[in-house]
Image (tube, helix red, strand yellow):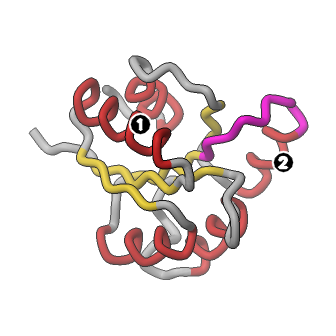
Amino acid sequence: MTHKRVLIIDDEDDLREVARICLELVGGWEVSTCGSGSEGLVIARDQQPDAILLDVMMPDMDGPATFKELQRGEATKNIPVILLTGKERPADHANFNELGVHGVITKPFDPLTLSSDLFKVLGWPP
């Protein structure tokens, strides 16, 4: 069985760790993590994950800016990106979808359903 690989880019250490553990244990994902958009760009280019979970609100380079840089990179432009956000307003989600991301998962997420939520947003069978 081939495991899917996901990169989590989020500046919150605890959130990254909870998401990593849940995706590995519940969903069987291979997970890489980092705490900044600039680091995420390098990891995404080098590791070519199957998907990226990207925090919207980060210092220095926020999620939308990171996503735009991923889209500019030949090696990263086709990697599906799902935004992680605490913003729940429909207008915010509409703006995120206009960026061209594959979807949005709202924080706080349910750790036990994160893997199935990720598959659902990506349109992949679990």
Queried whether the magenta region covers residue 44, the answer comes back as: no
- Residue 87 in the image: state x and y as whole percent: 78, 36
Which residue is situated farthest in the front direction here? 14
- Which dot marks residue 88? none
Which residue sits at x=40%, y=24%?
A: 116
According to the picture, the residue beneath numbered tag 1 turns out to be 19
Measure how far apart labels 1 and 2 are at the Cα level: 24 Å
Q: Amino acid at mark 1?
A: Ala
Question: Looking at the image, is mark 1 or mark 2 nearer the viewer?
Answer: 1
- Residue 102 in the image: state x and y as whole percent: 59, 46
Question: In the rendered image of this protein, does residue 117 appear above or below residue 57?
Answer: above
Quadrant of the snapshot with the C terminus: top left
Q: Are marks 1 and 2 in contact (CB under 8 Å)?
A: no
**SS class of the residue under badge 1?**
helix
Q: Amino acid at mark 2?
A: Asn
Q: Which residues are magenta?
A: 83-91
According to the picture, the residue beneath numbered tag 2 turns out to be 95
